[in-house]
Image (cartoon, helix red, strand yellow):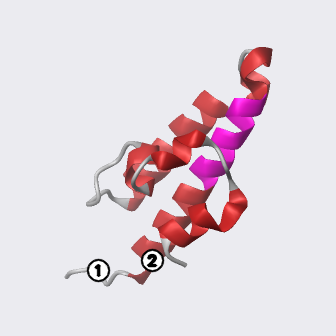
Amino acid sequence: MEWKNIIKGGQSNLEATRLKSPYEILSVNPDVSKEELREAYIKKVKAYHPDCSDPFLKQYNQEMLKIVNLAYEHLKEVSECQPIDT
């Protein structure tokens, strides 16, 4: 599924979805390797995990975690579809 349709589909309504791409959400380049993608994902999950943050930010972090998960799943699917150059 295309990234814009995932975000506009109402799965998350947080203002942070104004970011233009899943690459921006995970702070990676489009030519990222699978290992770098996973590391960036883990870093974001730790940053936004609701149990490890300020109680006042819990709802915001829950929404951001959903967005991070959507971005990671999307990029993981995209990277699996691309042929590997040998």
> Looking at this view, is 85 or 73 the one in front?
73
Q: Does 40 sit left or right of 1 as displayed?
A: left
What is the number of the mark on residue 80? 2
Mark 1 sits on what residue? 84
Q: Does 80 sit left or right of 53 as displayed?
A: left
Q: Quadrant of the C terminus?
A: bottom left
> Looking at this view, is 36 or 19 the one in front?
19
Q: Position of residue 62 (x, y in %)?
A: 74, 38
Name the residue located 58 percent from the left edge and 48 percent from the top edge: 68
Mark 1 Cα-neighbour bin, 10 Å: few <14, some 14–19, many ≥20: few
Q: Does 51 sit left or right of 4 as displayed?
A: right
Instruction: Name the residue type under label 1.
Output: Ile
Q: Secondary structure at mark 2?
A: helix
Name the residue located 35 percent from the left edge and 81 percent from the top edge: 82
Please say whether residue 76 is visible from this viewpoint: no
Name the residue located 59 percent from the left edge and 29 percent from the top edge: 47
Instruction: Decide: is 20 above or below 79.
Output: above
Magenta highlight range: 59-69
Residue 64 lies within the magenta run: yes
Please say whether residue 28 is visible from this viewpoint: yes
